[in-house]
Amino acid sequence: MLRILHTADWQIGRQYSRFELEDAAALAEARFKAIEKLATLATEHRADLLVVAGDVFDSQTLSDRNLRRSFNAMAGFTGPWLLLPGNHDAALSESVWTRARRLNCIPDYVHVLDTPELFLLDELKLAVLPAPLTQRQTYQDLSDWFDQAESPAGYWRLGLAHGSVSGVLEHLDSHNLIDQNRVQRAKLDYLALGDWHGTVKINERCYYSGTPEPDRFRDNDSGQALLVEISEPGATPVVQALPVAQHPWRSIQHHLNDDTDLDLLERELNALADQSVVELELSGQLSLSGFERLESILGQSQARCRAWDCQREALRLAPSEEDLDALQADGYLQAALKQLQELRHGSQQQAAEDALLILAGLLRDKEGGHAH
């Protein structure tokens, strides 16, 4: 039995500039935690090796400190770990990999497969065929050499590649292409792929694992690693997805026709997993009291989430007569409210609505103060 833990696209050092600084830092930190989780899973499931099919690092300019931290995070599984350079961390003549070697921070049980040649793990009777990227983009299939590569009799054959499978995940501008028939042509027991950030089955011997920690709002089955079990050379692999992610990413679009729709929004937000990363787009209209309730709902949800991006420019204020009467404004304030109501229907709609909300809040605070 051979047990492989297949992962890819860690992209250590990735930046999350769309979020608040504190949240962006936490999401970057979660990628180190993902390495530790992978090491734990490899140990728990008695994996024989752990393979990372490209894009271990997000760029060649990762800091020395984070480079060291990445390898330190692997300590929970003493390997072997097989790391393949991808398009973000290609094996250039001067690269993040050459720097890691100069820093002497790569443990003995970690193998960087940065040359396209057979790599043998004799203790496992395993022949590994890597297709490392030596530049960010190439228009030739770097896995071509697998077909002619001979391995010792009775050894498993494991391919590692990073790119787009031709005819399956290929786009008009696709590069780093991989022949969709490579498994059959090269007689591979398993082909571990990276580059696609979600889990995708190409065929029974070929999978993308996806990134272990989600990094986008597309619903693409990310946030896991694949445990691949093969009973003997030539046998069909049994592939099981193992959850890794700390932070689920959710994109929610919600149209509010009126205040009654807030109940549905509240239920949807309450159903979010703690520590989620949320993109929320609101549209429609609410009354003044509806806006106040919305602020409370959003505040409670945001406090449970790890990162939060709420777009509400398409949400309009539509105060009812009851709203305005309840504010108990008189004199100048009553005239100001009336003028803001009129401005809502002109070119200054957004500014007028913002001012109405502020004025309503002040009047309610004042009313609350008199109550004491």
Image (cartoon, rainbow, N blue to C red):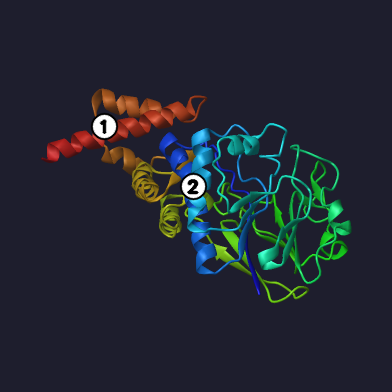
Q: Which residue is drawn at 48% across and 44% down?
A: 27
Q: x and y percent of residue 358 in the render? A: 33, 31
The disc, 1 or 2, on the residue closer to the chain's N-terminal end is 2
What amino acid is labelled 2 in the image? Asn
Q: Which residue is drawn at 69% across and 44% down?
A: 85
Residue 208 visible in the current orientation: yes
Mark 2 sits on what residue?
72
- The alpha-carbon separation of the residues under discs 1 and 2 comes to 54 Å
What amino acid is labelled 1 in the image? Leu
* View extreme (top): residue: 332
Q: x and y percent of residue 182 in the render? A: 84, 59
Name the foreground residue: 15 vs 48.
Answer: 48
Mark 1 sits on what residue?
362
Q: Is mark 1 on a helix, strand or loop?
A: helix
* Relative to 127, residue 177 above or below: above
Of circles 1 and 2, the one toward us is: 2
Residue 256 visible in the current orientation: no
Q: x and y percent of residue 79 in the render? A: 57, 58
